[in-house]
Image (cartoon, rainbow, N blue to C red):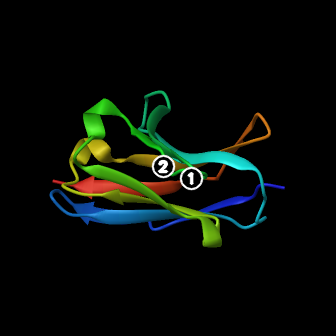
Amino acid sequence: QVQLVESGGGLAQAGGSLTLACVDSGRTSGTYAMGWFRQAPGKEREFVARITMSGGFADTADSLIGRFIISRDNAKNTVFLQMNSLKPEDTAVYYCNAVNGGTAYWGQGTQVTVSS
């Protein structure tokens, strides 16, 4: 069973960087893609980026291209989100997402706070 565990959130200053990690601790086979969404206070959850586990095809929200980079380590069932040039508006809870067998799974989220 897919069990997603996020790490790497925390406090950063504007202009700084953070890297989030998400591991499928269930070591589930057959996952099609893993990625990230985020939800800021008072806003809807929005897509950040995703990557296919086979082939490594990546897709990033247009507004984040050039600052956020998604990557994966298949051997470790892990996906990473490198966030650069952080802005206060990047402050949100970041959720890991995996699609396996047509079902979407979610992690519990990790808080990212960017101070100005």
Closer to us: 43 or 5: 5
From the viewer's perspective, tell me whether residue 75 is left or right of residue 59.
right
Residues marked 1 and 2 touching at CB (< 8 Å): yes
Q: What type is the residue that disc 1 sits on?
A: Gly
- 6 vs 75: above or below: above
Give the image quarter of residue 32: top right
Disc with the residue nearer the chain's start (1 vs 2): 2
Closer to us: 97 or 58: 58
Residue at 80% from the left image edge and 39% from the top image edge: 101
Q: How many marks?
A: 2
Q: Secondary structure at mark 2?
A: strand
Q: CA distance from mark 1 to mark 2?
A: 5 Å
How many other residues sit within 10 Å of disc 2, few (<14), some (14-19) or many (≥20)? many
Residue at 78% from the left image edge and 57% from the top image edge: 29
Residue on which the image places disc 2? 94
Tag on residue 77?
A: none
Residue 67 pos. (x, y %)? 24, 49
The extreme front residue here reads 55
Residue at 84% from the left image edge and 55% from the top image edge: 1
The extreme right residue here reads 1
How many other residues sit within 10 Å of disc 1, few (<14), some (14-19) or many (≥20)? many
Q: What type is the residue that disc 2 sits on?
A: Tyr
Residue 81 visible to the viewer = yes
From the viewer's perspective, tell me whether residue 84 is left or right of residue 59.
left
Residue on which the image places disc 1? 109
Residue 106 pos. (x, y %)? 67, 46
Residue 9 visible to the viewer = no
Residue at 47% from the left image edge and 48% from the top image edge: 93
Q: Secondary structure at mark 1?
A: loop
